[in-house]
Image (cartoon, rainbow, N blue to C red):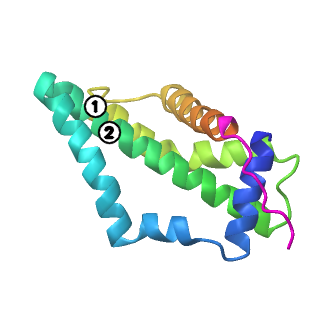
């Protein structure tokens, strides 16, 4: 299954109301579960290298923001019937939306005045990386018709 097909499936599922997973993840209970895992990872890294823990927390925030934005853009494209052939536009929308998060992260790690090129490079790499992960997810088996 291609990346577009996987995201098309997600967009379609979101568009027709199958939002249980995302609803859970955005709920207080879901956020608590995610946060618990993230905190445990940061604590483990922080024991070895406290500065690295700060960076890890920032990277987790970027990944979460990027994933959320990719899903939002894909769902919007699905709702508009524009999922196919719009990858460049969707990518640009994601990169633009997460740009402020990237700038804030770069500042948090000591780059006081990140350039637009630095921000766009990191935002593009983040978006492309998440998309590659989503692209690598194998297709799910469909249940036989009853």
Residue 83, x across and y down, in percent: 82, 55
Crowding at dot 2, Cα within 10 Å, few <14 / some 14-19 / many 20+, comes out as: some
Please name the residue shown 32% across and 26% down the image: 111
The furthest residue to the front? 146
Q: Between 77 and 42, which is closer to the camera in this rendering?
A: 42
Please name the residue shown 62% across and 56% down the image: 71
Q: Which mark is residue 58?
A: 2
Between marks 2 and 1, how big is the CA–CA gap?
5 Å
Q: Between 29 and 49, which is closer to the camera in this rendering?
A: 29
The furthest residue to the top? 48
Magenta segment includes 144? yes
Q: Which quadrant does the N terminus fall into?
A: top right
In-image side of 17 versus 68 (left or right): right
Say which residue label 1 marks: 55
Q: Is residue 10 above or below residue 67?
A: below
In-image side of 71 versus 77 (left or right): left
Residues rendered magenta in the picture: 136-146
Residue 56, x across and y down, in percent: 30, 33
Quarter of the image holding residue 34?
A: bottom left
In-image side of 136 versus 146 (left or right): left
Answer whether labels 2 and 1 touch (C-beta < 8 Å).
yes
Residue 27, x across and y down, in percent: 40, 71
Please name the residue shown 76% across and 65% down the image: 12
Please name the residue shown 62% across and 60% down the image: 72
Q: Is residue 40 above or below residue 117?
A: below
């Amino acid at each position: 299954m291609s990346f577009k097909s996987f995201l098309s499936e997600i967009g379609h599922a979101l568009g027709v109301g199958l939002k249980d997973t995302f609803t859970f993840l955005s709920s207080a209970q879901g956020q608590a579960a995610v946060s618990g895992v993230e905190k445990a990872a940061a604590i483990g890294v922080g024991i070895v290298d406290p500065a690295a823990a700060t960076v890890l927390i920032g990277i987790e925030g970027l990944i979460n923001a990027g994933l959320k934005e990719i899903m939002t853009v894909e769902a919007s494209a699905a709702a508009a019937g524009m999922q196919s052939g719009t990858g460049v536009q969707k990518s640009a929308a994601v990169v633009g939306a997460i740009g402020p998060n990237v700038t804030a992260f770069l500042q948090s790690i000591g780059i006081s005045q990140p350039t637009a090129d630095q921000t766009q490079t990191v935002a593009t790499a983040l978006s492309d990386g998440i998309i590659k992960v989503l692209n690598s997810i194998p297709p799910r088996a469909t249940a036989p018709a009853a």
